Image (tube, rainbow, N blue to C red):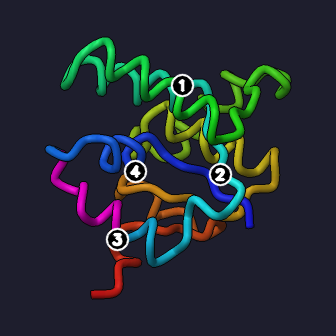
Amino acid sequence: MKIFLDSSFIISFALESDENFKEADMLIEQENIFEEDCYISNYVINEVITVIGNKLDLNRAKETYYILQDNFTILNEHKIENFNDKVMDIYEEYDTKLSFTDSSILLLMEYYDIPTLVSFDKGFKKNKEIDLINLDSIKE
């Protein structure tokens, strides 16, 4: 199965201090997420590395970068003609309820035929075309 990993999920898993750290760990185990084909984008890398660097330090940010690079497929946004224009259309459609990066995720998922998204962002619940794995997916 192909799964796109949102930065909210990756950050929660990477930071023990994150409010969703335990939930991220539970999802990984329950959904066997890392046993699937996992995808991220350059925008996701940007968000993750920025947050990790700000909350921890440069060394941990670099370590996280190499973990992402070595373990996930990084999709090339620039393969999609007029990528940013198309993302802006999605961003407008969601009336700023999704960030620009989150809007780009929806475009990438459609373009690369990735049906499943792991995210803790509530804005994705409005999209009925994707299979969303989120906090609601946790079986206690």
x, y percentage for residue 34?
57, 59
Q: Are marks 3 and 1 in contact (CB under 8 Å)?
A: no
Mark 3, residue position: 26
Q: CA distance from mark 3 to mark 4?
A: 12 Å
Specify few, some or many for label 3: CA neighbours under 10 Å numbering under 14, 14-19, or 20 or more: some
Q: Are marks 3 and 4 in contact (CB under 8 Å)?
A: no
Give the residue drawn at x 71%, y 56%.
37
Which-is-in-front pick, marks 1 and 4?
1
State which tag comes first along the sequence, 4 or 2.
4
x, y percentage for residue 76?
76, 27
Q: Which residue is nearer to you in this view: 21 or 107?
A: 21
Q: Amino acid at mark 3?
A: Met
Mark 2, residue position: 38
Which circle marks residue 9 in the picture?
A: 4
* Chief SS of the magenta region: helix
Q: Amino acid at mark 2?
A: Cys
Which segment did they paint magenta?
A: 18-25
x, y percentage for residue 17?
14, 44
Q: CA distance from mark 3 to mark 2?
A: 17 Å
State which tag comes first along the sequence, 1 or 4.
4
Mark 1, residue position: 66
Say if the magenta span includes residue 132: no
Q: Are marks 4 and 2 in contact (CB under 8 Å)?
A: no
State which tag comes first along the sequence, 3 or 2.
3
